[in-house]
Image (cartoon, grey):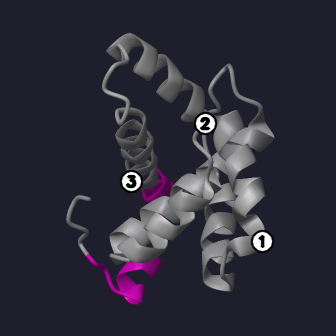
Amino acid sequence: MLTSPELSDKELAQISPLVMAYVGDAVYELAVRSRKIMDRTRKIRDIHQEVVGLVNAEKQAQFLRKIEDSLTEEEIAVVKRGRNAKTHSVPRHAITADYRWSTGLEALFGYLYLKGDEERLREILEMIDFT
């Protein structure tokens, strides 16, 4: 995994939930891509199509709903900050509710990465079934 900046709680509190989601989106996509390349006999086009199917608002919202009960109070607070953040646009192909939930999941991944809590990040990623 990439080296985290290991921000303090005070520094994390000053970061916008949308910025956390922006970072979390990259963390999540890298995790999905890393898992999908394990079958080296597949063509990159096939891997890419599968990854695209997993890194969209609908799928991410489903993942969050499945793992929500396993999150700590602190993590739920981060998810809510991300989910309730005021976005100026929603992709045409996304349902607004799913987009908000996916932003919450991405904010959580960004938060854990920026905090430097790679162990918890791995635990949560292991809860998600990327099949």
Up-down relation of residue 96 to residue 102 (above or below) = above
Specify whether 69 is left or right of 2.
Answer: right
The kind of residue on which mark 1 rests is Asp
**Up-down: is 116 above or below 20?**
below
Question: Given this view, does label 2 or label 1 mark the residue nearer the observer?
Answer: 2
In what quadrant of the picture does the N terminus appear?
bottom left
Give percent across and percent down for residue 123.
Answer: 51, 69
> Which residue is tagged 1?
69
Q: Residues within 10 Å of mark 3 (few under 14, many from 20)?
A: some
- Residue shown at 62% from the left, 26% from the top: 91
The image shows residue 7 at horizontal and vertical percentages of 31, 79
Task: Measure how far apart labels 2 and 1 are at the Cα level.
Answer: 21 Å
Dot 1 or dot 3: first in sequence order is: 3
Q: Quarter of the image holding residue 117? A: bottom left
Q: Which residue is mark 2?
A: 131
In this rendered view, identify the residue nearer to me: 5 or 96: 5
SS under mark 3: helix
- In the image, 39 versus 47, the foreground residue is 39
Q: Residue at x 37, y 30 (%)?
A: 39
C-beta proximity under 8 Å, tags 1 and 3:
no
Left or right: 31 in relation to 95:
left
Between disc 2 and disc 3, the foreground one is 2
| Disc 3 target residue | 23
In the displayed structure, 77 sits above or below 56; it is: below
Quadrant including the C terminus: top right
Q: Is residue 19 magenta?
A: yes
What residue sits 35% from the left and 69% below the top? 114
